[in-house]
Structures are given as C-alpha cells and as structure tokens.
Amino acid sequence: MVAELMALAGPAPIASPLTELMPAELPVREHVQLKGLWHRYPNAAAEEWTLQGIDLALGQGELVGLLGPSGCGKTTLLRLIAGFERPERGSVCIDGRTVAGPGRWLAPERRGVGMVFQDYALFPHLDAWRNACFGLRRGQDTSRAGWLLELLGLKGLEERYPHELSGGQRQRLALARALAPGPSVVLLDEPFSNLDVEVRLRLRSELPAVLSRCGASGLIVTHDPEEALAICDRVAVLRDGVLHQCARPRQLVQQPATAFVGRFVLQGNLLPATAQGNRIHTPLGDLASSEGALSPGEQPLEVLVSPEAIALLPDGDGEAWVQGREFLGREWLYQVQLGTLKLRLRLPLEAEYGRGQRCQLSLRPGSTGILFPTREPLRVLDAGPA
Ligand code: ATP
C-alpha cells in the first residue's frame, strides 16, 4: 500500500512551512468514465474474469458508492482507475483523457487520483503536516494542505505523529493527504470500517461536503448498504465482476434491477413463485400486479418482499421456526427458516419469541413486492399461512 501511495505521489520530497491560507476558488473538474472494462489477474484461468464489461461514469463532484459481496471485484475496480492494474479490454478516462485503454497508458502519479485506504496507510515516521503534504510536488503550494487540515478538524495537530492521533483523526489525515494535491477523483476503499460507530457516522456524514468543497468526485467501496444509501449520490452494485445496477439510492430501493440487488441492498426476501393468470403464488401467500395485467413469461419466478412485509404467528405446529434474532433498539430483526428458505423479518418489540419457536408466516395484506425477472410491481392480496 505504501508503494502504491508512492506511485500516486511520484518521487518529489516535501516542502514544509506551515501555512493556513485558504486556497483560491477550486476549479470545477471533469468526470471519470469507465467503458467496457474487463480484467483478469495473471494467474487466473481463461474464463476467470475479475471484472466483466464494467460501464460506469462519475459526474463532477459526485460521490458514487461501490457495493457488493466479498471478492466481487470492488478493490480491483479502484486499482484499475488508479493505475495499479491494467484492463484487458475497455478504457478508463479521467478529466476527458484516456488513461488506460487500447494503446494508451498513463502512470498512476499522472492520473490526478487520490486514494484513501481502510487502514489509513499513513507514514509513521512523518508528522501530520508532512503526511498531508506527501503527495505535493517539490515547490507546490502547501496552502491547500493547511486548508484541508483545518477543514477536517486537524488544525493544531500538525506536529503529531500518526501514533499520537485517534483512529478518526488518522482517517481524516488520510483524507487530507489524498485531497491535498487537488485530485479530480478520490478512491476510498472501506475508509470507515476500522472506526467505532460514533466516529464512523460523523466522518461519513462529513465526507460528501468535504469532497464537494474540494471539487473532487469520489468512488467509495463499502460493504454496508445502509452506509452507501445514506451518503452517496448514486450506488453501483457489483456481483462476480458484473455491474447489476448503478442508480440513485431511492431508485435502487424502489426499482432494483435484479433480484440480487433487491436481496443484497435492501436485505429483502426472495420467495419462489409461480404464476396463475394474473395471480402470483408464493409459499407465504398470493400477490397480484398493482398496475394491471402481468406478463411473467416462462422463466423461473421470484418475488422480492421486504422484511416488514412478512407477519409471524406463533404456532406449535407451524412449519417455520425462529433461527435467531437481533435487537435493533426499536424493533427485532428475526431470522426464520421455512423449509430451505431463510427469511428476515422486522417485528415490533412486543413480538418477542425465542430461538426454536415454531410459527406460521404470511404476507401482510396490502404490502408490496416485486416480481423477478420482469420487475413488475405486486401487491399482496390476502394472507396465506405457511
Ligand atoms: P472484499 O470486499 O473482500 O475486499 P473485493 O470485492 O474488493 O473483496 P477484490 O479484492 O477486487 O474483491 O478481488 C476480486 C477477486 O480477485 C477475488 O476473487 C480475489 O481473490 C481476486 N484477486 C484479488 N487480487 C488478486 C491478485 N493480486 N492476484 C490474483 N487474484 C486476485
């Protein structure tokens, strides 16, 4: 990681007088564009692609979240943009310049990209000021570093070494260092995952404003859907190297493009389904289109319903049983097993059941669902005990 930072920064040493000048109005920058990106690691089998035809654009000053299960290729995508990996096909454009693509290659330090890592990757032998100035070229104005330290609440700590800073302060310093050279894009790889909840919530809520004041676009990897939906302008969902959807948080929630997006991002339940005329049967009850006639086609069907859409009725003879539960403060999150289905239910605090409790499950009348793969909106008709 240190080697990667050195690569981004280039070879120049640091000029160091402490200044606290506010930089002049920051320039508005162009966006990042990824077109048809395919990538495979050298030791991988012929068909073992890490990324498969990724198309993604970041608008000026936009913060885009990159979500997906472990190993789906999130970090690899950041490494392709930064220039630590080469795409096998496709191109990366930053600020209107092709930095990677057929016959084109720009070294990492010439791409105008900043990086923030999960473990901060600060230089332990440099104080906060020198860390913040690390990416500046010899003789480059340091006022922006001073401004960033102030903006990020680190003023007065310039002479402290990383081990003399708290986790939150270290991550702020890592952000200041990434932004000091004035990059047009900042790539953040799970930057908040080592922080305690309070610091994490504060820092993540500050991030969009900091990026926007710096005129930088951001691409942030997180495995926490709630975090991505909370702070990002758009969220991209990746699975096995394939981009399933990139959309505004509200659209992602209301119109997930695939069953996977619905399950992963919304933590929803996927129920196997069959169509009969205009009715959709599931093991928990029937649904119908909320917009008119259905056209489910011949493919296997699934219905996505939220954890709030399933009701639980305790019943010693019920086929379903409670596997576990989590206390969420204002409600319970239950895991309930029905045959091979593992379901998530959100229930009020009064609904307190122990592990092993047998029960019946049903869809709450009037709640909604989405049919996949056709993405047709559905409405629950009536409850049917499981
Ligand atoms: P996580 O959320 O666990 O960090 P990720 O989505 O960031 O995962 P990547 O780190 O991009 O996933 O890895 C994608 C795939 O590429 C994984 O299967 C991983 O094992 C593989 N991989 C990553 N780095 C290398 C490498 N240097 N050489 C070979 N394979 C690699």
Image (spheres, helix red, strand yellow):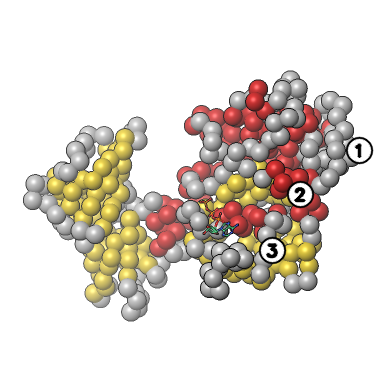
Disc 2 is placed on an element classified as: helix
In space, the residues marked 3 and 2 are separated at their CA atoms by 15 Å
Q: Check disc 1 and report the residue beneath it.
A: 139
Whichever of callouts 3 and 2 sits on the residue coming sooner in the sequence is: 2
Q: Kindly identify the residue that appears in the image at 79 percent across and 35 percent down.
A: 133
Whichever of callouts 2 and 1 sits on the residue coming sooner in the sequence is: 2
377 sits left or right of 311 in the view: right
Q: Kindly identify the residue that appears in the image at 20 percent across and 58 percent down.
A: 339
Nearer mark to the viewer, of 3 and 1: 3
Q: Residues within 10 Å of mark 1 (few under 14, many from 20)?
A: few
Q: Check disc 2 and report the residue beneath it.
A: 7
Looking at the image, residue 80 lies above or below residue 356: below
Nearest the eye: 329 or 138: 138
Q: Residues within 10 Å of mark 3 (few under 14, many from 20)?
A: many
Q: Where's the N terminus, which quadrant?
A: top right
In space, the residues marked 3 and 1 are separated at their CA atoms by 31 Å
Q: Residues within 10 Å of mark 2 (few under 14, many from 20)?
A: some
Q: Are marks 2 and 1 in contact (CB under 8 Å)?
A: no
Residue 32 occupies quadrant = bottom right
User: Type of residue at label 1?
Assistant: Gly
